[in-house]
Amino acid sequence: MSCIRAALAVLILLSHAGLFAQTERSRDTQTPPQNIVEIDASQPSTLPETGFLHLGGRSSTGHDLEVNSRFLTLDGKPMLPVMGEFHFSRYPAQYWEEEILKMKAAGVNVIATYVFWIHHEEIEGEFDWSGQRDLRRFVELCAKHGMYVYLRPGPWDHGEARNGGQPDWLLKNANVRTNDPDYLAHVTRLYREIALQLRGLLWKDGGPVIGAQLENEYSLHGPGMGAEHILKLKEIAVEAGIDAPLYSVTGWPSLDFPPHDVIPISGGYPDGFWFGSLTNLPPSMNYLFNLNRQLGDMGATVPSEDPTGKVDLKHDPYFGAEEAGGMESAYHRRPLLKPDDIAALTLTGIGSGLNLYGYYMYHGGANPLGRRTTMQESQATGYPNDLPEFNYDFQAPLGEYGQVHESYRKTKLLHLFLNAFGSDLAPMVAVGPKHVPKDPGDTSVPRVAVRSRGETGFIFVNNYIRQFSMPERAGFQVQLKLPGKQISVPAAPLTLPANSYFCWPVNLQMGDVRLQYSTTQLLTKLDTQKEAAFVFFAIPGIPAEFSFDASGITSVHASGQKVSRTDSSIRVEHIQPGADTEIEVVSEAGKHIKIIVLTEAEAELATVFRMKDGDHMLLSSSAVFLDGNQLHLRSTDRQDLRFKVLPALSADAPTSASMAVETRGSWTDFRFGRPKASISWTWNKTKDARAIGPVKMGPFVKWRSGSVAQAPDEEVFDAAAEWQLNLAQPLPAGVSDLWLNVDYAGDIGRMYVGKSLVDDNFFNGTPWEIGLKRFLPDAANSGIRIKVLPLRQDAPIYLDASVRSKLPIHGEIAQVNSLTLKPEYEIVLTLRAAQNAIRAQK
């Protein structure tokens, strides 16, 4: 991320106003008389181009990772990875492993991470790779658990770090981000240090590091800059030992890069803290299906062909590395995202043709302590935004303390699909309908895209825009023209629910039978010893329906559901979704195909894992992750320590916890009881707030048409209200964390352990959630102080309207409505096949 994006804010707003996607403007934008969407996917897709990109490579273990003009291949098979950003140096090292496992459980299979130069060489010549700065150990843990790593080694990263991640001393001694010899000498030393950390861990060595992004959001042009500089960075990286099969650059704000040597990557956010606006932003183009790779919201100003003739994106696959996993808060602008804001954008990205979906961020964190400086971006250091000194939660699927946010479960619905069917989806070409919205704010036209290959494909529908209400659409149907015939999905038009988004399969081959279409969304496929099981989930407000090609089918068993048959199709309707809802299809060859139709809420609880006896699916409202065959369940509600699984597993009663097991249909239910943890603690207010002066404005920023509010100086915090919290003991047995929930209203919250500031929070209307385990036992010995700085009613900061409306009309506020402390209970089981036992570890 970068202030460069914000420098093009005017162009972005023009994009929002309708200057998006040149090919979209050339299409017919006349609204159809009904919500009938016509899409022509009958043209045969061309084979992807190979040989243009000088990338790819073989591992020492004999595996080939290659890339063509459309997708990645692993040993010749297409792959569509899910990549999530997790900054190792922003998270305590003792908890890295469980966080990696949480990401894996969510269907993420590539971890991207910045290497912030200032985190490792804050003082010139003194590199620090210890503790939470230990890059090597982090990558080793990724390798241990089968996760790929995509490195972002800078030398300039941004990521809201001080100086964009470059040390203060460097800025004083070199002409940074150019081919200046002094700067390149420092970069060479940095890259060599990074390469030493990665020795034996690169793809070519059989390790997990598959790629490296060079620089970030690079915009300089001229001699020793632009493509010339990017190529030089790659040469230095390879010579230093950062030798990976993939190299990339951000495709914004410029496409000035060496075309054969790197892949430009995309990004898109539903909002931005860097904007100067104190009101809601216009509708984002990222909720449109972007079939021609326009990057208006990220600052790119060029279409798919560079006018200079240097770059033509038809040679490059459509990859994303900064697709929104959330949004950080700056002092002057504090967007509040809903889970659907993120999940709907994930769907439009996949539907647009992205073949590597990379989140920024997927996992939040906190800046490490600096030896000489704080590590956050600030206006005082010449950057355009003030960020919290510590907090980098980013409202990501996994938060600052590893807490599971709702977006974790909602985005997982697509991840599990991509894990199971990504190799089929990757070669599919994205096409759009005859009628498209005329601009991002046009809600009159359904937003639909299709990815298809031959007769098979997926229909993507997005009827959702952040902070805007989308209408219900009666008579909705997709009329899809394929190479062999036209198909209407569904057979009879239906009502598209307001603010919905989903994906439907078309002509999906399921073993020996073909599913013509379904109005449910495909979640995953389970390959078990007994049979293949396909798992779908119903979209709220849309009747669940399956239509099969009648040829090759002997029978369809669907208890309590309507089954009708014609010469060409077998339709199953009146389906009541739920974990016990199954459809069995028997082919003429005698093979049985099981279909499970979950509710959307049940699907959000799903985790898929593989054991020696095949795939299993587990449903649990607890936070779930697996370490080999050890299953971890965590919840602050003891009633949530339960799961159901299929195919069956068995278990012995865990020590110090009760267990009940029940078989229901295809599922085995496990319920566990933990004794209630007794947590002795007290809290009280120790100081009232004093009145503060008006908020100061920062330096003038011309691309933002003016200044924005600047974070207060340190002495202002003397006016903050204070509360004291005292804990009597550390974590009880069977408790994995203590969650402190601070429901407050004010400007900035701060947390101290003893006299040390350990976390801060820019108020955005949601409670501040803090995991205390990392601060124990010091927090129990020294106590915890919470400070809340008053928020003036006239403070020129952006808050969501729903938050602003609850604040006083006049004066200022600094209050804690409640402090709650909840233990997080944990059960850990060793999983075994059904004929064996499961031994409890905790």
Image (cartoon, rainbow, N blue to C red):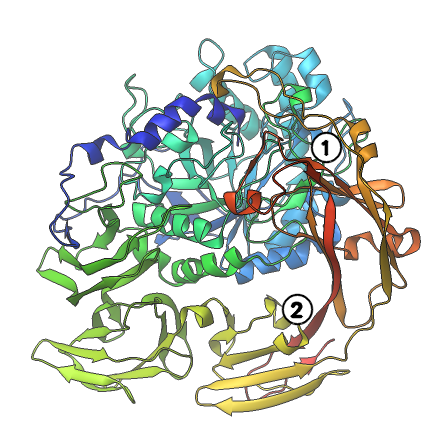
Q: Mark 1 belongs to which amino acid?
A: His
Q: Position of residue 614 (x, y in %)?
A: 47, 76
Give the camera-side residue of 187 and 793: 793
Q: Residue furthest top?
A: 223
The residue that label 2 is drawn on is 634
Give the answer, above or below, for where 685 lies relative to 665. above
| Sequence-wise first label, 1 or 2 | 1
Q: Could you say whether the residue bearing mark 1 is in a helix, strand or loop?
A: helix
Which residue is more in the foreground, 416 or 121?
A: 416
Q: Is residue 168 left or right of residue 147?
A: right
Write down the quadrant of residue 641 in the picture. Answer: bottom right
- Image quarter of the C terminus: bottom right
Q: Is disc 1 surrounded by few (<14), some (14 to 19) or many (20+) residues within 10 Å? A: many
CA distance for labels 1 and 2:
34 Å
Q: Amino acid at mark 2?
A: Arg
Q: Is residue 730 left or right of residue 580?
A: right
Mark 2 secondary-structure assignment: strand
Q: Is residue 795 above or below residue 30?
A: above
Q: Which residue is mark 1?
A: 120
Work out whether residue 259 can be spotted: no
